[in-house]
Image (tube, rainbow, N blue to C red):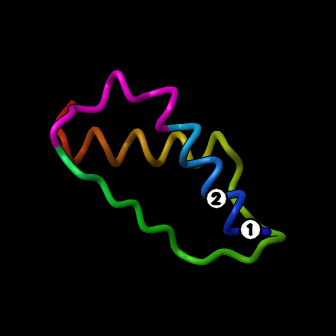
Amino acid sequence: MGRNRVKRIVREIYRTQKDKIPTGYDYFIIVNRFDSYKLPSFDDYKKDLLKLFQKVLHI
């Protein structure tokens, strides 16, 4: 259950932010395992992914 939720969250974050992410690259997002009862919230994932994109892509 947790893995599917994480995939849906990452897809939704990408869908809403794809205009800010440069094209022409392949992106691989690897998520560490979490206890399915203690999964981070959508906002936590969004904050962390946007911070990662800013750091890596300098956007």
Q: Position of residue 41 (x, y in %)?
A: 71, 49
- Few, some or many C-alpha atoms within 10 Å of disc 1 (few <14, some 14-19, many ≥20)? some
Foreground: 36 or 28? 28
| Quadrant that contains the N terminus | bottom right
Q: Which residue is mark 2?
A: 6
Q: Is residue 53 left or right of residue 13?
A: left
What residue is disc 1 on?
2
Q: Is residue 10 above or below residue 17?
A: below
Secondary structure state at the residue bearing disc 1: helix
| Mark 2, secondary structure of its residue | helix
Region in magenta: 14-24
Q: Residue at x 39, y 29 (%)?
A: 18
Q: Amino acid at mark 2?
A: Val
How busy is the neighbourhood of tag 2: few (under 14 within 10 Å), some, or many (20 plus)? many
Name above or below for residue 57 compared with residue 17: below
Q: Who is closer to the viewer here, 50 or 24?
A: 24
Locate residue 21 relative to residue 17 in the image: left or right.
Answer: left
The tally of labels here is: 2
Mark 1 touches mark 2? (CB < 8 Å) = yes
**Mark number, residue 49:** none
Asked whether 15 falls inside the magenta stretch, the response is yes
**Residue lying farthest to the top in this orientation:** 19
Quarter holding residue 34 = bottom right
